[in-house]
Structure formats: structure tokens, C-alpha cells
Amino acid sequence: MSRRYEELSGPEILDRISPSSTLLLPIGAVEQHGPHLPLAVDHVIAHETATAVVDAVGEDLDIWQLPTLSVSKSNEHAWSPGTLWYSADTMMAILRDLGRAVASTGAERLVLLNGHGGNTTLLNTALRELRLEFGLKTFLVHPSVPPAYGGVSTESELGMGIHGGLNETSVFMHLRPELVDLSKATRKVPEALADNRFVKFGGSVMFGWLSNDFDEDGYIGDPTGATPERGQGLFEANVTHLGDQLAEIVRFDFGR
């Protein structure tokens, strides 16, 4: 049985969606990822991850997959022609409108599955706003936590493979190998930041940045060793981990 929200008819919403249901919203981006990857990376990873995890656990956990929100807040890449992006105000307004619509279905839980690291701070803010205004229990998960927000990156990338680097390129090679051109990839790691104690990606001091602050090609990491086999392993592990997270989310009730 399909767990795609948009495949339900209007009358079926009242029959199939209940307070025990969880709606999963994949959020990606359409933005530059350097010369070796297409604009679609974050959209594809968010959509395919959501599809895989709903196929795996959706029936058991009563999870429904909402249509993927492909454009989001990508203004760190606004310098690059082709990037599509919403302002923070527009993105918050979209999430508010979607939250209002979700609340009308009777579902009590909304999970944002974020495939674009640049959304992370804004989506954390949105969780509380949607909770306050619509009474939804709201959650934020990632295919993998972005290294700039405490997630892991490879030692060879000095923990800073945050955009178009080894792991992201590998996962995309697994999903869409025909769209990757590694012949155009080189190492683009901001080596000098690694010596900082605090002001660096994953450090305790956050800082504002644009993707071309570090290099004109606008990607940050070292994708040169990427392989689809590595990507498949990462993708499957991420789907399993998200399934475990969702199993806890559907039971969550503020400790009551």
C-alpha cells in the first residue's frame, strides 16, 4: 500500500490520517554544488531518503510521505546563477502555511527531513513556531547531520566536508551516477580553519559564510575519492538510522 500523501483522495484523508499518524516532509534544495555535481543534489537525497525510509517503516509506524519541498533557503549560494532560493521570511511563511494544512488533517506529528544544511537553523526555529501556533508535535531529522552543525565528516577533509565533499558526492553517485562528473572535481578544503579552536565548521563559534568565501567553485570538501559503493553504504545506514529515530518520534509525548 502506498504511503504517499498526495496519492490519497480528499475523502480518504479523514479515513486514513489520524492523531497517531506522522507526516514526513522532505526538504531539499536546488543549488550549485561545484562543477562535478548538478543543482539537484539536496533535492534528490532528501526525496530518495524519505521514500526509502517510508517504504521500510511507514506501514508499521503510520508514517505518510508529503511531497518534497525542493526549493528552500539556499542564499549562501545566491552568488551562483542557477541556484533557486527562498528568503528566510518566505521559507518561514511556507512552513507556516504547510503546518496549518497539516494540522487540519488530524495528524499530531510533523517531521521535517532536511537534506540541505543551510536550512538547519531556520528549521529549528520553525519547530517551535509550528508547535506554538498549531499544537503540532514537530521534529527535525537529517539524512545525516551536517558537519557544520556537529555531524561527522572524514578525517581527510579535516571534518569540513560540508558541501559537495566525499560523502555527499558518494551518496549522489549511488542515487544518480549518470549526473556526476568526477573529472571536474579537486580538493577544496579550507585547511587554515582546521587550526582554529573555536571558529570553524563544527566549532563552538558559529560564523556567517557564503559558499564562495572559500573558493570560487563554491564547494567545500574533497570529493575526488567518491564512489557509488561508499555512497550505497552511507545511504542504507542513514535510512536504517532514520527508521530508528522515527520509531522513537512516533512514541514521543514530552515524558508524560
Image: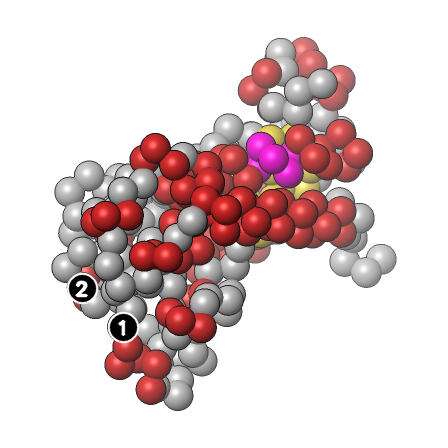
Residues at circles 1 and 2 in contact by the CB criterion of under 8 Å: yes
- The colour style of the image is secondary structure
Q: Position of residue 222 (x, y in %)?
A: 32, 62
Give x and y (percent) for residue 46: 48, 41
- Dividing the picture into quarters, in which one does residue 91 lie? top left
From which residue to which does the magenta span run?
50-54
Q: Residue at x 56, y 20 (%)?
A: 6
| Location of mark 2 (residue) | 215
Helix, strand or loop at label 2? It is loop
Magenta residues, dominant SS class: helix
**What residue does disc 1 label?**
190
Kindly tell me whether residue 99 is visible in this rendering. Answer: no
Residue at coordinates 43% horizontally, 78% vertically from top-left?
203
Q: Secondary structure at mark 1?
A: loop
Nearer to me, 133 or 48: 48
Find residue 220 and report its horizontal and vertical position in percent.
Answer: 30, 62
Q: Nearer the viewer, residue 185 or 123?
A: 185
Q: Residues within 10 Å of mark 2 (few under 14, many from 20)?
A: few
Disc sitting over residue 164 in the figure: none
How far from the left and from the top, in percent, is residue 48? 51, 35
Above or below, 17 against 119 in this view is above
Say which quadrant the C terminus sits in.
Answer: bottom right
Pick the front one: 8 or 129: 8
Res 80 visible: yes
Which quarter of the image is occupied by the N terminus?
A: top right
